[in-house]
Amino acid sequence: MPTYHYVLASKKFLLEEEPLEEVLRERTRDYHEKEKEIDFWLVSQPAFLEAPELADVKAKCPQPAAAIISTNSSLITWLKLRLEFVITGEFIAPSDTIPEPLASLEAASVKD
């Protein structure tokens, strides 16, 4: 099972107060130039925060939250340095408590 790494912050901070669009556009361009497959995703209200083992992380992050999730730990380290006031961590998925690593609670509520 792959390890997913993340940067996490409040949705307002990550999507409105940081130059995230520019950062992600820059990374996407870099990946395309290197013919590297995209291995990062922006997830609003990430469902992985509902896992019992991440309760402490969820409690530290203002809600609603947003995360950039990647299988590339170096990218997450780079984002942490670039974005500064974010929480970083990792989890292994799929698992019993995190069946879908990129799932969003927003998507679940829209389906209901």
Image (cartoon, rainbow, N blue to C red):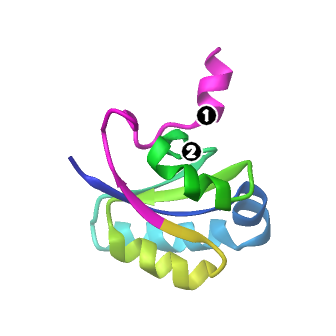
| Residue 62 tag number | none
Residue at 65% in and 14% down:
112
Q: Label 1: state its secondary structure.
A: helix
Looking at this rendering, what residue extends furthest in the top direction?
112
- Compared to residue 11, the image places residue 95 above or below, namely above
The residue labelled by disc 1 is 105
Write down the quadrant of residue 106 in the picture. top right
Q: Label 2: state its secondary structure.
A: loop
Q: Amino acid at mark 2?
A: Pro
The residue labelled by disc 2 is 46
Q: Amino acid at mark 1?
A: Leu
Indicate whether residue 55 is drawn in magenta: no
> How many marks overall?
2
Between 26 and 83, the residue placed more toward the observer is 83
- Compared to residue 102, the image places residue 33 above or below, namely below
- Compared to residue 33, the image places residue 54 above or below, namely above
- Distance between the Cα atoms at labels 1 and 2? 6 Å
x and y percentages locating residue 56 in the rendered image: 57, 56
Q: Are marks 1 and 2 in contact (CB under 8 Å)?
A: yes
Between 19 and 93, the residue placed more toward the observer is 93
